Amino acid sequence: MGARAFAADLARQRVAVLGATGSIGASTLDVLARHPQRFEVVALSAARQVAKMADLCRRFRPRWAVIGAGHGAALRAELNQRGLLDVEVLEGQAALQAVASAAEVDIVMAAIVGAAGLAPCLAAARAGKRLLLANKEALVVGGEVFLRAVREGGATLLPVDSEHSAVFQALPEDASTWSARVDKIVLTASGGPFRTRDPATLADVTPEQACAHPNWVMGRKISVDSATMMNKALEVIEARYLFGLEPRRIEVIVHPQSVVHSMVQFRDGSVVAQLGTPDMRVPIAYGLSWPERIDSGAPALDLTRLAGLTFEAVDPARFPGLRLAWEALEAAPGTPAVLNAANEEAVEAFLAGRLRFDRIVAVTQATMEQCLPGPVGGLDDLLALDRRARAVARHWVQQWAL
Ligand SMILES: NC(=O)C1=CN([C@@H]2O[C@H](COP(=O)(O)OP(=O)(O)OC[C@H]3O[C@@H](n4cnc5c(N)ncnc54)[C@H](OP(=O)(O)O)[C@@H]3O)[C@@H](O)[C@H]2O)C=CC1
Ligand SMILES: CC(=O)[C@@H](O)[C@H](O)COP(=O)(O)O
Ligand SMILES: [Mn+2]
């Protein structure tokens, strides 16, 4: 190894945490704080939580703090009050993309929720960053456009979603062998808070009930997705793009304990699974350190203390949204973006008390039937399709408004 390469090896990796004020953001910063010799936080982003962002700036002293459009002045005032004059405040989408692709950034944690994270992901991918993907919606919407940006930019795309990190850990190192060696990928689904609830009563569930996930503490949008199992539909599409296997070779089974995070079944019948306590710091630490392993802070798994590990088939009547994943993948390119946009609109309406829980999937399905994508050449086409699908979804939300 030459002296220069050795010096670079010793240098700290510079990390931008997009979505720093959220659940994944908090877990990421917890892992980073355990390894100050290895990582340096150079940028943080949030949409509107100004006070929380200022607290994070005081703790991590990033060079840049990016906040949603219209909140820059408030953040500057908070930082001034705390005497944090060395943090540069930037505002809006263009700033997110600038930070995600900045030369001073080595690793981008994509932890913004929803399609809003797509443009910064593409910027990071085109700039050749190590891109840690929690923001599954970005890949669902971006699809081949996203993968092309990764290829052309020479980026390293690593999964953070627990199931996809599990699959990645179970797969052989050489990606060119995956298709020949793997029979199928089996994603585990907890079944969410309504796994055993009488489906006839799902019309009445409240946002608080839907967000009470049995095993994971997460943001409200993904919590609702878990309750409808649209989270797993998004994850099937995410797996298709990350691992390149045909959709029919991706399966979902219910595993209520969320200890087996997912598995790979090989041609010879072997099944390799990844297990761990349900703690997102594990896949985050793996993405940060891959191919090495570092302390994540998560408690070790003690199998002797588990009451048992159980598995069930998915009941399609209880979770009608799951099959939409395969339908979207088999339909015209761009259909996953329509699925995602409709789901985002429906979840937002449900959380705002404007839509019944059991209409979320209905809105998504109706939108997919009505909103047919045109050609998808790049980001502008995807954003236009996303807008069009949201308009159709809002129409259905209105039809079924409470
Ligand atoms: N939480 C988890 O355990 C897991 C999450 N994921 C995925 O990771 C992503 C983040 O999830 P989670 O951390 O739970 O979500 P949270 O809602 O907790 O956090 C979302 C973050 O994104 C920011 N944000 C929200 N909207 C925008 C926007 N329009 N533009 C820019 N920033 C925005 C929020 O800022 P502000 O706080 O200011 O609103 C916040 O920092 C999602 O895609 C989710 O599916 C995947 C696996 C597990
Ligand atoms: C932690 C994580 O990766 C989430 O996506 C989680 O898996 C949600 O649980 P469900 O299995 O209920 O969707
Ligand atoms: Mn997941």
Image (tube, rainbow, N blue to C red):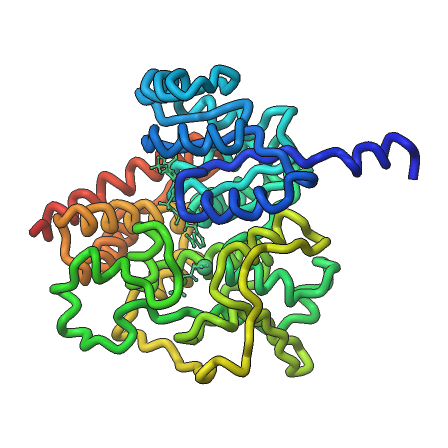
In x, y percent, where is residue 302? Answer: 55, 76
Indicate the quadrant where residue 171 lies. bottom right
Residue at 60 percent of width and 52 percent of height: 285
Relative to 227, does residue 139 appear above or below in the rendering? above
Indicate the quadrant where residue 89 lies. top left
- The tally of labels here is 0
Given residues 220 and 340, the one toward you in this image is 220
Residue at 41 percent of width and 21 percent of height: 82
Is residue 2 visible to us here?
A: yes
Relative to 312, does residue 360 appear above or below in the rendering? above
Residue at 52 percent of width and 42 percent of height: 29
Relative to 208, does residue 249 appear above or below in the rendering? below
Image quarter hosting the N terminus: top right
Residue at 22 percent of width and 54 percent of height: 363
Left-right relation of 4 to 281: right
Q: Residue furthest right?
A: 2
Relative to 185, does residue 76 appear above or below in the rendering? above
Assign ligand 2 to one image quadrant.
bottom left
Q: Residue furthest left?
A: 402
Is residue 250 visible to us here?
A: no
Left-right relation of 274 to 178: left
In x, y percent, where is residue 332? Answer: 42, 51
In x, y percent, where is residue 57? Answer: 47, 29
